[in-house]
Image (cartoon, rainbow, N blue to C red):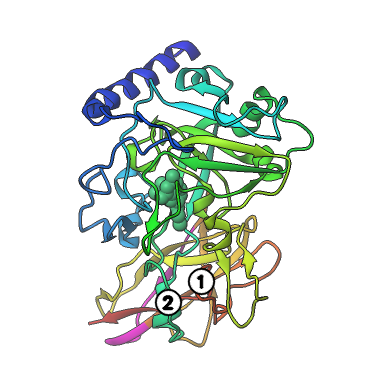
Amino acid sequence: MTKAAGCATVFRMAERIRRRTALALAGLAATAPWWPRPAFAAASPIVKPLPEDKFFVYGTNAETRWEALRGIGDVVPVDRFFVRDHTSTPLLDADTWRLQLYGTGLRGSPTADRPVEFGYRDLLRLPSRTITARIECAGNGRSFFTTQQGQAVTGTAWRLGAVGVARWKGVPLATVLRRAGLTASAVDLLPQGLDPNYVTGGVDLGPVRRPLPVRKALDDVLLAYEMNGEPLPPDHGHPVRLVVPDWIGVASIKWVGRIEVAASALASPWSTQYYRLWGPDYPPEGVLLGRQNTKSAFELPWQASFDAGREHVLTGRSWSGTGGLRHVEVSTDGATWRRATPLAPARGWQRWAVRWRPPGPGSYTLRARATDRTGVAQPDVAPYNTQGYLFGAVVAHPVTVA
Ligand SMILES: Nc1nc2c(c(=O)[nH]1)N[C@H]1C(S)=C(S)[C@@H](COP(=O)(O)O)O[C@H]1N2
Ligand SMILES: [Mo]
């Protein structure tokens, strides 16, 4: 297929999505506050089906069940990819969508009401890049602070399924920033979503937005318009989202509509109030989160049951935001560890397997522990923080043998 034909196909697919959702687009901003009004809030916060065999649903969020990844390659299909919405999935029209860039870090310091603009077709015409990258919520594993360490934390009580790997196609953010007139004095970006404002405790915090250092933006961040070979689905940011490899999920702003580019440091509630580490082990002002940590999970249901008297193959995955893994070990008796066999190739995360013949009927605890490229292994205990971010300790996975 020629490049132009490829674009046309993508565009036709996008067009089909657009027609299906056209009704939703009636009332776009009549009166404009300083941010664009939310285009539309769907009746259900998440648009795609969330069958019980693939997801746990918590309000506006849906967690992937790990057993739904068994036998699946590195790339997680959309039908089981986790969703984390602060409010609800908006249905946006790719034809009228605009990316607006403004701020003191761009040549001529364009203002928010006279921004530099790119349309969907403008992005499709720019040189594209395709990457396999993981998106993982900073709160993934949060429930284990409570169930494993007896600590109270705030936020969605995920197990380990707030993570997924996909093939993302789009335009490097660096390309768009340079075309928008990025200057050498730019330090921070503030990408923001077009989903409804996040309101909590009676306070309107505005659109979801979080500062991103220019250094990271120029390194490997993508403005993605395709996921696994299809136009981005509504729940994952249609028509365009950021993909910020190895960083906590909230950096990967979905439904991105505006990006402030500033010659000074930027902040938002997502960098001052949320997504910081607070607790007795941290300084009073907290620690700003950026990179993800190292985790491991078995491709098994919680409380999985196994037949006694025969050998089983346990499979799982390990991953790290610190740039690759050395090895993974598994323990089935709480005392001894053996190396898991890596399943090649590893893109986004490392799949692995170990054989297990349970010694007899009863309850067992399975554990998997990854060691990252720098030689740091997952610890037994995760350092406590009030909002339960970055649970990186080894998870005790209960199973029964009968
Ligand atoms: N605009 C916008 N972007 C967003 C969010 C959101 O609610 N609104 N959630 C963030 C969070 S906290 C995570 S973990 C990821 C989840 O991406 P996914 O829903 O595609 O899995 O999107 C991020 N981007
Ligand atoms: Mo998240």
How many angstroms separate mark 1 from mark 2 (CA)?
Answer: 7 Å
Vertical order, 118 against 46 (above or below) = above
Vertical order, 223 against 56 (above or below) = above
The residue shown at (49%, 37%) is: 34
Q: Nearer the viewer, residue 208 or 223?
A: 208
Q: Nearer the viewer, residue 245 or 192?
A: 192
Q: For mark 1, give the secondary structure.
A: loop
The stretch in magenta equals 351-364
Q: Is residue 357 magenta?
A: yes
Residue type, mark 2 in image: Phe
Can you give x and y, in whole percent of width and height, for residue 291 in the image?
61, 57
Q: Which residue is mark 1?
A: 391
Residue type, mark 1 in image: Phe
Q: For mark 2, give the secondary structure.
A: helix
Q: Determine whether, in the image, residue 236 is placed left or right of residue 57.
A: right
Q: Which residue is mark 2?
A: 144
Give the mark count: 2
Can you give x and y, in whole percent of width and height, for residue 311 in the image?
34, 73
The residue shown at (55%, 78%) is: 382
